[in-house]
């Protein structure tokens, strides 16, 4: 109470984890740690463990206090996440919590999960048993407890039978249930890495997280945390990694996140965050990976995002973002992966400035509302491997310049309003494996040069306006697994060279306008006729 580690109401409740932990520390713990009065030690009234001495051999009262607080806090964590009665009470308190806007569609956690509780709220100790709990609540020092790594001790190193400052707490995928108690935040003041990902933890992330001044890595992903990300997170000035993905977090992203200037990785995907992406996100100059996908963010992508000069992997997909794509994205010269797909309110043209990204490997802009022509400048993206622009309102022709994309393996252009022929320059795209251009207004003859794309495996050209006969050169593509040509104005006979791909190679899906009794294409080997 004096050090505000626990609240009085918790310590007085015999059913609480705090009460049970205090009883264990005082009555059952064989180590019997205590905060020792230094005046009594001078008179020889108390014995000191070597671990309680500072580097000069003198007693460090503050260290002794912290050892006791750490042992108590971890004991609270144990009871809070593994004691059936405590976990059952937590489950009852969580019933009825909603996330998002409270609708059935936005609620993933609706209080009806009985994975470890029956209808009477009874919890089985077998269901919530930790997978690994070596030395927890034993006579061993906490530095030997499973998942605990202490700060290096001058004499004893890292792993020793003692109680010292916790540096790392790693209980990932350990079947922890219940809530994460505040004692972890307020007691483990020198912790550098906290990894509790892959568990069944519930409740909120406490404001006390801001007291962890030395925190470098926070991994709480794949749990059931609710509530908002507290603004106090900005007080943690040293984090390199912030991984909170796959939870039920909601509310706006606090602007204070811009104070985490050492941050390298921020993973917040698959939550229910709302509102605008704060402009302060652009202050994270060392950020390499930012995952904000599968949330409910709205508004324009901030122009400040162009200041993320170290960014390698940016994912904003599956939100409700609107407006146009900022030209400042063209300043992310280190970026390799850019996902901004599935934001149906994003409109306008594709910025030509994206052609200034020499390391870009993946560009996902599908299922937006983009319009205008395909930028010819994209032919300069020599590192591009995956280009997904399908399901937009793009117009015009496919640029000849795109034939320079020698490393491109997948090109998806389906579901737009593109017109004109497939450029002859595509013969140079020798790495292409997937070409999906269905449901457009493409026209002209199928170019014989397609036969030079020797790695091609999937060719979707259905629902266009192609005419004339099917070129025999397609039969040279021995790696083809699928060809869809139906819904065009193609005529004649399916070349025998293509049928041999069915007989002798791996082609297994061939569709054309060959439906009897009046087929446009006569085909002896098609798997489906339209």
Image (spheres, rainbow, N blue to C red):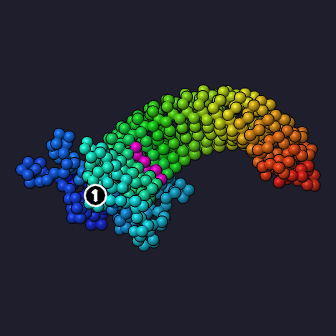
User: Is residue 356 shown left or right of residue 482?
Assistant: left
Residue that appears at 24% across and 51% down: 67
Residue 152 against residue 287 in the figure, above or below = below
Dot 1 falls on a residue whose secondary structure is: loop
Residue that appears at 40% across and 54% down: 171
Whether residue 140 is visible here, answered yes or no, is: yes
Measured from the top left, where is residue 498 in percent x and y?
Answer: 85, 45
Measured from the top left, where is residue 115 in percent x and y?
Answer: 48, 65
Q: Residue furthest bottom?
A: 120
Residue that appears at 82% across and 34% down: 449
- Label 1: how many residues lie within 10 Å, few (<14), some (14-19) or many (20+)? some
Q: Determine which residue is flagged by label 1.
A: 140
**Picture quadrant of residue 6:** bottom left
Residue 380 against residue 434 in the figure, above or below = above
Residue 46 painted magenta: no
Residue that appears at 52% across and 30% down: 306
The answer to which of 467 and 79 lies nearer the viewer is: 79
Measured from the top left, where is residue 52 in percent x and y?
Answer: 20, 48
Measured from the top left, where is residue 168 in percent x and y?
Answer: 35, 47
Residue 90 against residue 368 in the figure, above or below = below
**Picture quadrant of residue 142:** bottom left
User: Is residue 125 shown left or right of residue 275?
Assistant: left
Q: Which residues are magenta?
A: 217-222
Residue 220 painted magenta: yes
User: Is residue 241 shown left or right of residue 48?
Assistant: right
Q: Residue furthest left?
A: 43
Quadrant housing the N terminus: bottom left
User: Is residue 31 shown left or right of residue 39?
Assistant: right
Whether residue 186 is visible here, answered yes or no, is: no
């Amino acid at each position: 109470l004096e050090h505000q580690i626990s609240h009085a109401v918790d310590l007085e409740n015999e059913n609480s984890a705090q009460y049970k932990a205090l009883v264990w520390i005082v009555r059952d713990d064989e180590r019997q740690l205590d905060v020792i009065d230094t005046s009594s030690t001078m008179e020889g009234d108390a014995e000191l463990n070597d671990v309680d001495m500072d580097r000069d051999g003198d007693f460090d009262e503050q260290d002794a206090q912290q050892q006791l607080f750490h042992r108590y806090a971890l004991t609270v964590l144990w009871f809070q996440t593994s004691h059936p009665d405590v976990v059952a009470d937590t489950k009852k308190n969580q019933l009825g919590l909603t996330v998002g806007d409270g609708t059935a569609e936005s609620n993933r956690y609706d209080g009806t999960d009985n994975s470890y509780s029956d209808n009477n709220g009874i919890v089985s100790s077998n269901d919530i048993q930790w997978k690994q709990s070596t030395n927890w609540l034993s006579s061993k020092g906490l530095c030997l407890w499973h998942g605990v790594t202490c700060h290096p001790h001058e004499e004893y190193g890292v792993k020793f039978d003692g109680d010292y400052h916790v540096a790392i707490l790693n209980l990932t995928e350990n079947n922890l249930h219940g809530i994460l108690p505040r004692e972890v935040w307020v007691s483990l003041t020198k912790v550098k890495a906290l990894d509790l990902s892959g568990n069944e933890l519930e409740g909120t992330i406490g404001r006390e997280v801001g007291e962890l001044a030395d925190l470098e890595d926070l991994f709480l992903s794949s749990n059931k945390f609710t509530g908002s990300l507290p603004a106090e997170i900005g007080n943690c000035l040293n984090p390199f990694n912030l991984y909170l993905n796959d939870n039920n977090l909601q509310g706006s992203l606090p602007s204070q996140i811009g104070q985490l200037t050492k941050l390298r990785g921020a993973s917040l995907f698959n939550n229910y965050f709302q509102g605008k992406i704060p402009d302060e996100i652009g202050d994270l100059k060392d950020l390499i990976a930012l995952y904000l996908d599968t949330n409910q963010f709205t508004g324009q992508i901030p122009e400040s995002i162009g200041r993320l000069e170290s960014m390698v992997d940016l994912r904003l997909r599956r939100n409700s973002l609107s407006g146009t794509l900022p030209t400042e994205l063209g300043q992310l010269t280190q970026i390799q992966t850019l996902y901004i797909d599935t934001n149906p309110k994003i409109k306008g043209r594709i910025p030509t400035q994206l052609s200034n990204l020499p390391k870009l490997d993946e560009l996902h802009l599908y299922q937006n509302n983009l319009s205008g022509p395909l930028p010819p400048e994209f032919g300069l993206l020599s590192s591009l491997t995956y280009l997904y622009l399908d399901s937009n309102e793009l117009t015009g022709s496919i640029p000849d310049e795109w034939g320079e994309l020698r490393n491109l393996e997948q090109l998806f252009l389906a579901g737009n309003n593109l017109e004109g022929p497939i450029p002859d320059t595509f013969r140079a795209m020798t790495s292409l494996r997937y070409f999906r251009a269905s449901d457009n207004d493409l026209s002209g003859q199928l170019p014989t040069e397609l036969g030079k794309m020797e790695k091609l495996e999937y060719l979707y050209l259905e629902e266009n306006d192609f005419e004339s006969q099917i070129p025999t050169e397609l039969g040279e593509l021995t790696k083809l697994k699928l060809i869809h040509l139906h819904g065009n104005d193609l005529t004649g006979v399916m070349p025998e060279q293509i049928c041999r791909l069915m007989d002798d190679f791996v082609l297994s899906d061939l569709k054309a306008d060959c439906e009897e009794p009046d087929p446009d294409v006569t085909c002896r080997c098609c798997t489906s006729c339209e």
